[in-house]
Amino acid sequence: MRLKIIGSAAGGGFPQWNCNYRLSREARAGTPGIQPRTQSSLAASADGNGWVLFNASPDIRQQIAQTPELQPAADGPLRSTPIRAVVLTNADVDHVAGLLSLRERQPIAIYSTTEVLRVLEANSIFNVLDPSIVSRRVLPPDQETAICDGEGRETGIVVESFAVPGKVALYLEGTSDPQADFSSDKGDTIGVRIANGQDKDAAFYIPGCARIDAGLRMRLAHAACVLFDGTLYTNDEMISAGVGQKTGARMGHISMAGENGAIAGLADLAIGRRVFVHINNTNPVLDENSSERAAVTAAGWEIGRDGMEIEL
Ligand code: MLT
Ligand code: MN
């Protein structure tokens, strides 16, 4: 199975359009060791021909342009694509807005939870992907689903989805509920186990996760590869950077560092490769020469970057 990180940044990308924090500024200036990144998405292929996308970011057009494997074959039909299906891990803008760029009556399939499919259903703009051509299919939790293209042909990629602690998309948050839970596990945010039907080895893709609990640790215990929520290094990072008022916890994202962070939470597990994805433009690890980057690397983690390939 081939996996390709086609977008490694969190919502907004890196640099973000209106962000003048030092990291975005340096990325814009082309400072060595600070690489720009597009928004959160992963591609997987069982046979090297057909690809399944995990999330469709607003940068999808650029991501396809940067990834020859996702482009129509030079000798292919007039309308064609190697993209067979899109699996959505939540309804955040950075994960669904790219669907709109996949219009033009291409029979791909969209898979997600009933909660996320309901959000697409409620926003009629997504009907530019005519539901009679682009099938929308429920990924039932906690069981394996063979991912098929829009015409029902298997892609060879098998996915098991599971709810992780998280929240509804920002644009669906109520403003008046003081009890709102930003780390519930009701199916608004999922993680996925991605496997090639024939192989035992699997990768876990979890670009949004509010905390690591016992159930998640059990799932990840012997994983060949884990691609995990690397939004923030510390919980109050956006506040101390002066670019926002929200903590990571309020946004439904765990931090990398600290006793409740992802590094500590998964440290003792026998995971083959651990890679952070969905990295926010305030995260100091984006600077390859930072002490935080050195600490994360020393803890055995890789920092995802656009175009990074993983073969299992
Ligand atoms: C998130 O991951 O928290 C969201 O993508 C934020 C957003 O929608 O801007
Ligand atoms: Mn996001």
Image: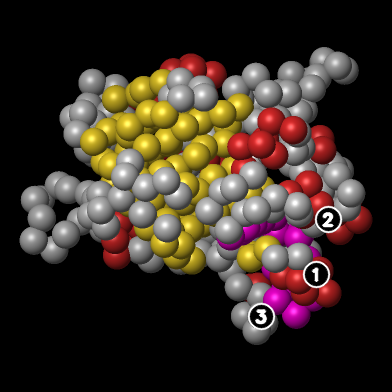
Mark nearest the camera among 3 and 2 is: 2
Q: Residues within 10 Å of mark 2 (few under 14, many from 20)?
A: some
Q: Secondary structure at mark 3?
A: loop
Confirm or deny contact between disc 3 and disc 2 (CB under 8 A).
no
Q: Nearer the viewer, residue 300 or 104?
A: 300
Q: Residue at x 60, y 22 (%)?
A: 187
Q: Give the distance between the C-alpha atoms of the residues marked 3 and 2, in whole angstroms.
A: 21 Å
Is residue 109 in the magenta section? no
4 or 17, which is in the foreground?
4
Residue stretch rendered in magenta on the structure: 273-290
* Viewer-closest of 150 and 18: 150
* 1 vs 3, front mark: 1
Q: Residue at x 25, y 49 (%)?
A: 50
Give amino acid for label 3.
Gly
The kind of secondary structure element at disc 1 is helix
Tell me the residue that label 3 is attached to: 33
Q: Amino acid at mark 2?
A: Ala
Which is more N-terminal, label 2 or label 3? 3
Question: 158 left or right of 231?
Answer: left
The residue that label 2 is drawn on is 257
Disc 2, SS: loop
Q: Residues within 10 Å of mark 1 (few under 14, many from 20)?
A: few
Which residue carries the number 1 mark?
295
Q: Split into 4 quadrants, where in the image is the N terminus? A: bottom left
- Judged left or right of residue 105, residue 189 is right
